[in-house]
Amino acid sequence: GLNSHFVVKRLKNYNLSDIQIDNLVNASKHYEGKHYDSKFEWSEDRIYCSELVWKVYKQALDLELCKLRKPANFELDKPEIRDIIKKRFENNLNKDEILVSPGNIFESELLKTVCTSSK
């Protein structure tokens, strides 16, 4: 996180069984060795951070941590977002691509904060 700040979250109201934990581990192994997806495409060829988390929970537990969104659902007019779009997509962002952001997962009502840094 920024300035070494971090927050750790876990599923709330869940006591995962050994089988469910194994399912999570096994689902994550499917993505080992995949390259990072800087274009945020919803595919199996490459993977980005929040896509990995979302897909592993969906595959292992049939649990959707948050709703998937399209780029139009984000604040694309912010200068920092516009700069990223221009750099990564040369202004050719696929507005029909589904995606999930770290913020979407962070705000999930299925998760609770269990630890945060003191900074």
Image (tube, grey):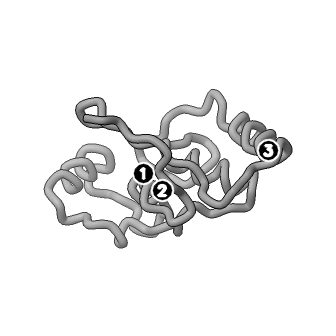
Q: Nearer the viewer, residue 96 or 105?
A: 105
Return the mark for residue 45: none
Q: Nearer the viewer, residue 34 or 29?
A: 29
> What is the crowding at mark 2: few (fewer than 14 residues within 10 Å), some, or many (at least 20)?
many
Residue type, numbered disc 1: Pro
Q: In the picture provided, is 56 more to the left or to the right than 76? A: right
Where the C terminus falls, by quadrant? Answer: top left
Judging by the rendered image, the residue that carries numbered circle 2 is 105
Residue type, numbered disc 2: Ile
Q: Residue at x 42, y 51 (%)?
A: 102
Judging by the rendered image, the residue that carries numbered circle 1 is 102
Q: CA distance from mark 1 to mark 3?
A: 22 Å
Q: Nearer the viewer, residue 106 or 15?
A: 15
Q: Residue at x 25, y 48 (%)?
A: 84
Contact between marks 2 and 3 (CB within 8 A): the answer is: no
Q: In the picture provided, is 46 more to the left or to the right than 71? A: right
Q: Secondary structure at mark 1?
A: helix
Q: CA distance from mark 2 to mark 1?
A: 5 Å
Contact between marks 2 and 1 (CB within 8 A): the answer is: yes
Q: Nearer the viewer, residue 44 or 114?
A: 114
Say which label, 2 or 3, has the lower sequence index. 3
Contact between marks 1 and 3 (CB within 8 A): the answer is: no
Judging by the rendered image, the residue that carries numbered circle 3 is 23
